């Protein structure tokens, strides 16, 4: 990624520097201050990328196989998995090229590596943006299914979902290309940070509203059975825990990366911010971990999808 605090990893491999060993240690920044830095090795990047790649590929293949899953909701889930697959795939490709360069098994000119690095950056950035968009789309879809249940199938149709998917992909590619081309402009970084905050607020508002409606519904049912307090409290606690986990994982995995972008704008030369910049690869690793978690949250809870997944794994096409 072409942002301050990171490095052109492919071009850096031309120097044949040894790969980092995973460790938690103190590193000196430009001013001589001691910084807490988590080094992520290429082997760990490769492992995380491969796990996410396989997991999300299974989700895409499973949804594609079962025609019962060809609905707007699963269309968004499939596209989320595809976005995460591309994030992981670009990471695996970049890491594999780095390892081959360092082993001397691959020889390439700097100009070729520069072009390859730009392509990987665009794929990674566009996939990250589309992943955030599809998380928002899934939240909106679930909100409509709860608050407009009787009109859901007339509001959220498959053609509309496909148009939304196409618009998200086109916008992600266009904006990611602009981001890579003008990464050193403050306005571009601010737009990305605002976009992340908007997605966070959108998801929080929608899911909190859905939780409140679900609690009201549970309370109404409990009144009919004259068990208002135990049922309402138990359901509300379970819903609050689920919501906290959902939003907490999202913020934990994506927040550090956008904090990094924010600090580039606010304090690019400050020693403390410089210490945070040194952990950029850790922030990318957290995003890849989020890509591993997404199928567990949004896909594998479906009994129909799990059943089809078993057929895919046993090659029962």
Image: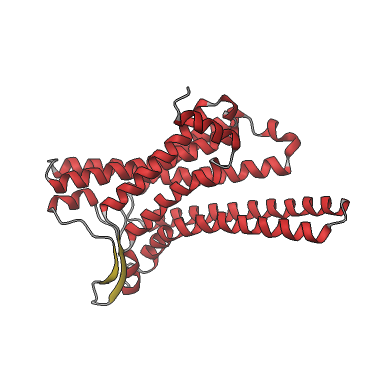
x, y percentage for residue 130?
Answer: 46, 42
Q: Residue at x 49, y 40 (%)?
A: 80
Kindly indicate the quadrant of the structure image that contains residue 257: bottom left
Q: Residue at x 70, y 30 (%)?
A: 154
Q: Looking at the image, can residue 248 be seen?
A: yes
As drawn, the residue found furthest toward the front would be 314
Q: Foreground: 90 or 230?
A: 230
Kindly indicate the quadrant of the structure image that contains residue 50: top left
Rendered view: 26 above or below 75: below
**Is 107 positioned to the left or the right of 23 in the image?**
left
**Is 298 positioned to the left or the right of 186 in the image?**
right
The colour scheme used here is: secondary structure
Q: Residue at x 73, y 34 (%)?
A: 151
x, y percentage for residue 201?
Answer: 58, 56
Q: Foreground: 45 or 116?
A: 45
Q: Looking at the image, can residue 177 be seen?
A: no
As drawn, the residue found furthest toward the top would be 317
Rendered view: 39 above or below 70: below
**Is 285 positioned to the left or the right of 155 in the image?**
left
x, y percentage for residue 192?
Answer: 44, 53
x, y percentage for residue 106?
Answer: 14, 40
């Amino acid at each position: 990624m072409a942002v301050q605090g990171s490095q052109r990893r492919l071009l850096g491999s031309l120097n044949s520097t040894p790969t980092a060993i995973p460790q938690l240690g103190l590193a000196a920044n430009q001013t001589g201050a001691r910084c807490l830095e988590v080094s992520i090795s290429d082997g760990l990047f490769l492992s995380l990328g491969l796990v996410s790649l396989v997991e999300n590929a299974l989700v895409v293949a499973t949804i594609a196989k079962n025609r019962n899953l060809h609905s707007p909701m699963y269309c968004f889930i499939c596209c989320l998995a595809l976005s995460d697959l591309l994030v992981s795939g670009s990471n695996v490709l970049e890491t594999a090229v780095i390892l081959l360069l360092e082993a001397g098994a691959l020889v390439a000119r700097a100009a070729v590596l520069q072009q390859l690095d730009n392509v990987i950056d665009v794929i990674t950035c566009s996939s990250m943006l589309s992943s955030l968009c599809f998380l928002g789309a899934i939240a909106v879809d679930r909100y409509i299914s709860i608050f407009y249940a009787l009109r859901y199938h007339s509001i959220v149709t498959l053609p509309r979902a496909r148009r939304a998917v196409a618009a998200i992909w086109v916008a992600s590619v266009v904006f990611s290309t602009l981001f890579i081309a003008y990464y050193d402009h403050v306005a571009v970084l601010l737009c990305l940070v605002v976009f992340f905050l908007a997605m966070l607020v959108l998801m929080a508002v929608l899911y909190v509203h859905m939780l409140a409606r679900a609690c009201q519904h549970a309370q109404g049912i409990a009144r009919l059975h004259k068990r208002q307090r135990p049922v309402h409290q138990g359901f509300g606690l379970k819903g609050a825990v689920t919501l906290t986990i959902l939003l907490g994982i999202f913020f934990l995995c994506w927040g550090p990366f956008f904090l990094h972008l924010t600090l580039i704008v606010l304090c690019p030369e400050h020693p403390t911010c410089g210490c945070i910049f040194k952990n950029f690869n850790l922030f990318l690793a957290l995003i890849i971990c989020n890509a591993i978690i997404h199928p567990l949250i949004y896909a594998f809870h479906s009994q129909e999808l799990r059943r089809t997944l078993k057929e895919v794994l046993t090659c029962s096409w």
